[in-house]
Amino acid sequence: MNADQSPLPETTTEPVAESEKTLPEQLPESENELSTQIGSQQQRIAALQVKEQRLKQEIATLQANYRSISEQLSQTQNAMSVVVQESLAHLEQRKQTLVIAIDSLERRSERIRAEMRTSFAGTSQELAIRVQGFKDYLTGSLQDLAASVEQLQLTPAVKEPPLQTVPIVESPPKKVVAPPSTLQFTEQRFQSTTKEIRQMLDEYRTKPDYYGEPWKLRRTFEPIHAERVSQWFFNQGGRGALKTMGSRLQNILISSAVISVLSELHGDRLRALILANMPERLGEWRRGLQDCLGITRADFGPDRGVVLFESADALAIKAERLVKANELPLIIVDDSEEKISLSLLQFPLLLAFAPDPQMAREREDDFFN
């Protein structure tokens, strides 16, 4: 048995030897694979580390942006709260101011209403006196008007006999026949009318009625304005030129006073004819008369109370038609007119504003510049 078993180690050792010989040959290949795997893992680890650092930087940037945005948002909210508080305070202050103004206006309205109630009752007697005086004046005026119509010879073919109750005043030869005497204002001939006109001018100056009826002066009337109007009525007989006041609005105020007085005396017969050489100036006259007399745009027109003209010839034609219709034309010439047309001098009521030469030159320079 031992003899048989002795060769077994030899047979077993040979394969081991061969395996030992082959094992060193296989080790280098496995080491290369391990090294390559280890290298690839190290590269992945390095890449992951780079990504980690990059993500950390991005996170830090986002955190910084978040903090800055949060600070800006808080500052904006604080600023908005301050603005809202200031706006509320301002609105509250305006509300208080408006409440005070409304209370003041209400008290003023009540005071004006009380004054109107008390003044209306007090002026009824004065109105009755004025109406009676106007009736007396109208009686004499109609007689003079009838005599003047006879002198004008409106119907030359048929001569009517003179009225027995109307005295006919013959004018001296070689003398121009005067217009109807109702259109003249002199203290010697019409004392009742003179007194009434002076009363109206004093009322305009001392008791201005800012809420009066239309065609009555509604603005403050100073003594200088009353002096100019009195000069035109009593010294110039309702036909002449006044030196300009230096302002078109002041001239309109004087003209409004004249129109107001004449409308009180002659009623709807009065027609105001305004002459100015530019539409802008006529617009100022329209707005000024509306403001001073309390009239509206409906009162301006060819057949209304006030007519506006840019041409003196057209105004003269309209005035002739009004005279034939037994109406009373009042011609008002703006201070921009440097010359008065001769066709306007035939009418009895003429109010022209003489321009200031120095102011005229300044206006021309401003226009051309």
Image (cartoon, grey):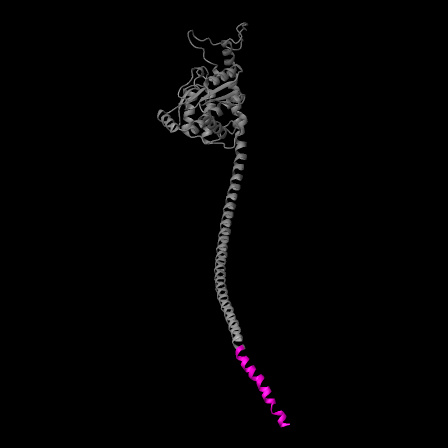
- x, y (%) of residue 147? 50, 11
Q: Which residues are magenta?
A: 1-25
Q: How many numbered marks, from 0 up?
A: 0
Magenta region, main secondary structure: helix
Observer able to see residue 184: no
- Where's the C terminus, which quadrant? top left
Q: Is residue 4 above or below residue 151?
A: below
* Camera-nearest residue between 262 and 162: 262
Q: Is residue 43 above or below residue 341?
A: below
Tell me which residue sits at (53%, 34%) in the image.
Answer: 116
Tell me which residue sits at (49%, 50%) in the image.
Answer: 90
- x, y (%) of residue 110? 53, 39
Q: Is residue 74 above or below residue 32?
A: above
Residue 237 magenta: no
- Where's the N terminus, which quadrant? bottom right
Residue 251 appears in which quarter of the rendering?
Answer: top left
Residue 9 magenta: yes
